[in-house]
Image (cartoon, helix red, strand yellow):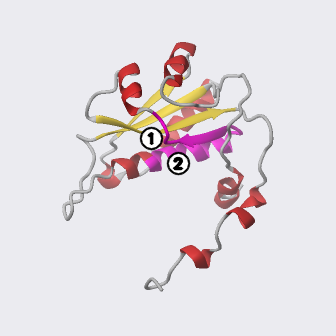
Amino acid sequence: MSFLELAKKRFSVRRYENRPVEEEKLLKILEAGRVAPTAVNFQPQRVLVVREKTGLEKLKKAVNVFDAPLAIIVCADHDVAWKRPLDGKKTVDIDASIVTDHMMLQATELGLGTVWICYFKTDVLKTEFNIPDQVEPINILAIGYPTGKILSPDRHDKARKPLEDTVFYERFK
């Protein structure tokens, strides 16, 4: 499968089978995140795997993971992240999102479904999972075997804006 075919195959899954993700698949997903590029290769990502019943119950206090059997809280350590010298922008969001995207696409290739979640109670996550002060939860990736309607890769022809609406050459019009 080409990269573009893989990217088009992925969709947000909000219904999962009640079956665990195999360890070997989890390790491939985590490896995909590990090799993801980060600014200046500082690797500020801190990845928290939640798959035990007690952990998933704690997670439910902060976020809806749609009963996925596995969730990965992708965090970034502000003390490790690169900061752009010209304006002081830290790359924690960017780095964590690249890591999340790599893991999401690896899960898709493995026949798993995912949903990328940014709507969560940060304070609850930090308390429930003992997340250090300098570490910020950025994204949560819910992962499992999808159930229900599988979306067609062709949906992008209608669901996405055409290139000419989002891509500019040499200058904005």
Q: Position of residue 159 (x, y in %)?
A: 70, 62
Q: How many marks?
A: 2
Residue 101: which disc? 2
What separation in Å lies between label 2 and label 1 (alpha carbons)?
A: 12 Å
Whether residue 31 sits left or right of residue 115 in the image: it is left
Q: Looking at numbered disc 2 in the image, what kind of residue is underneath it?
A: Asp
Given the current orientation, which residue lies at the most extreme left position? 85
**The residue tagged with tag 1: helix, strand or loop?**
helix
**The residue tagged with tag 2: helix, strand or loop?**
helix
Give the magenta-colored segment's residue range: 97-120
Q: Nearer the viewer, residue 104 or 151?
A: 151
Q: Nearer the viewer, residue 158 or 23?
A: 158
Q: Residue at x 80, y 42 (%)?
A: 149
Query: Can you identify the residue that label 1 sits on?
Result: 34
Dots 2 and 1: beta carbons under 8 Å?
A: no
The image quadrant of residue 64 is top right
Q: Looking at numbered disc 1 in the image, what kind of residue is underneath it?
A: Arg
Q: Position of residue 26 (x, y in %)?
A: 58, 30
Asked if the magenta segment contains residue 116, the reply would be: yes
Q: Residue at x 53, y 13 (%)?
A: 54
Asked if the magenta segment contains residue 112, the reply would be: yes
The image quadrant of residue 132 is top left
Question: Within 10 Å of the Cα at label 2, are there few (<14), some (14-19), or many (20+) other Cα atoms?
Answer: some
The image quadrant of residue 84 is bottom left
Of labels 2 and 1, earlier in sequence is: 1
